[in-house]
Amino acid sequence: MLNRVRSAVAHLVSSGGVPPPNPKSPDLPNTTSAPPAALPETPKSLPARAGSGTGTGSGAPAKTVDTRASSSRPTFLQLSPGGLRRAEDQAGRAVQSPPDTGRRLPWSTGYAEVINAGKSRHNEDQACCEVVYVEGRRSATGTPKEASRGQGLCFYYWGLFDGHAGGGAADMASRLLHRHIREQLKDLVEILQDPCPPPLCLSSSPGAYNPSHLVGPQSCWSSQKEVTHESLVVGAIENAFQLMDEQMARERRGHQVDGGCCALVVLYLLGKLYVANAGDSRAIIVRNGEIIPMSREFTPETERQRLQLLGFLKPELLGSEFTHLEFPRRVQPKELGQRMLYRDQNMTGWAYKKIEVEDLRFPLVCGEGKKARVMATIGVTRGLGDHNLKVCSSTLPIKPFLSCFPEVQVYDLTQYEHCPDDVLVLGTDGLWDVTSDHEVAATVDRVLSTYEPNDSSRYTAVAQALVLGARGTPRDRGWRLPNNKLGSGDDISVFVIPLGGPGSYS
């Protein structure tokens, strides 16, 4: 039954061949699911402004789920039907940005995108930019929030969702993830506004919490751990990602939630930026010429030990075809009994072991760099969706090895006096596959220097320059960069968020 996966893995390991057309995951059959019930609005009929504030929306309404999920673009692009057709033209690959109509994205954020060069039928990236108001659900003491309406919190939100094996997951995440975050923050409104440390417990009845029933006078436990307001926001984001993933799992049969997506999200709340990444998109801050990484990519190589540990603890997930051990190359039957280099889930270095029959199985992680795959199938290890993903010609699911939890990094904007040329750049892997951090910083400096500091269109110009630079120009042998190397054939989406200057935080 697994002859196809045997040949696919063998080809990948021995010759470095690239599996399936999409570099992250093979195409999956379309699936459908029930209308969402976890949140007030359903993705099938969401208004253009999906946030609960003055948001700019993240997806155009459509009459049918199939149409919207396959070819919709962010509403803030304001594409007409003709504009949408031009945006979907994979021969021309025209760069798309919000029109210069005077109504800009929050903070004068710049945005640009371009479709792939034929890797998939539609642009599977999605983007969202919102201003979201959070009204407290209850006070820290359990008192209903009715008496203090209008004392909620507002957060700014940017999100890039890089879909694979279909655009359904990216589309759904772009419409709903910020709502899950809002729901998670509702219990924290008063706590985050209170300079005192967060309470250990939230009582269901009025009155301050009393930790004495948890830690008695004779207890051997240490005193209460210190918990910061910042860590509460991080926890809210992490829970929101998990709830979003669970919703995709529930609704994949009655609503088109095909494939999966990497997710890169930024929140600005109470003076701090929270950058949450699950996948291989990337965020960097360019500040006074300095590059500050704000995320790291999650790939089979970077998460090798986590994947191997799970395979070691739960060998049933590997079936009888894969091994959690890693070898420098595919083990051959004739090498049984010999000693070969290997490493397991505990090792960063290499050692020798005697080759046994089980070592002839295919490696859980195979290939290198962009060709690395989990079970020869998918090239990213964190993200949302992929609940139907299985090893080729097998019923063996890959989802247990894929984490929906993001890594969240925090940047305190109040600790540095930013100038109008300081920016946060978010990009899907279509940008970073062919462009380095230093090249992005050089482009930021070059483009911004040609505009006046108070010209709010300068950040869109940077985003466009970054997308054009990564896309390249069409030549006889495809899209090429100035050095004649191949440009990015992937979907490319870029946000450029200014961190300083008048009106940045309004």
Image (cartoon, rainbow, N blue to C red):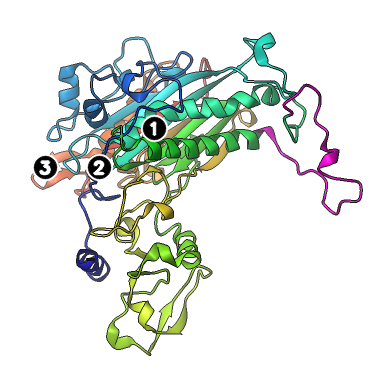
Disc 2 packing (10 Å; few <14; some 14–19; many ≥20): many
- In the image, 91 versus 56, the foreground residue is 56
Identify the image quadrant of the N terminus.
Answer: bottom left
What whole-number distance in Å separates the C-alpha atoms at marks 1 and 3? 36 Å
Note whether residue 289 is visible: no
Would residue 276 appear left or right of 123 to someone viewing this image? Answer: right
* Three-letter amino acid code of the residue under disc 3: Arg
Tell which tag, 3 or 2, sits nearer the viewer. 2
On screen, residue 37 versus residue 93, left or right, reads: right
Marks 3/2: CA–CA distance: 17 Å
* Residue depth check, mark 1 versus mark 3: number of the one nearer the observer: 1
Which amino acid type is shown beneath numbered disc 2? Asp
Residue 235, above or below 319: above
Q: Which residue is mark 3?
A: 475
Q: How far from the left and from the top, in percent, is residue 86?
A: 16, 25
Q: Nearer the viewer, residue 379 or 369?
A: 379
Number of the label disc, if any, that sits on residue 173: 1
Give the numbered dot on residue 490: 2
Q: Residue furthest right?
A: 217
Extent of the magenta region: 203-229
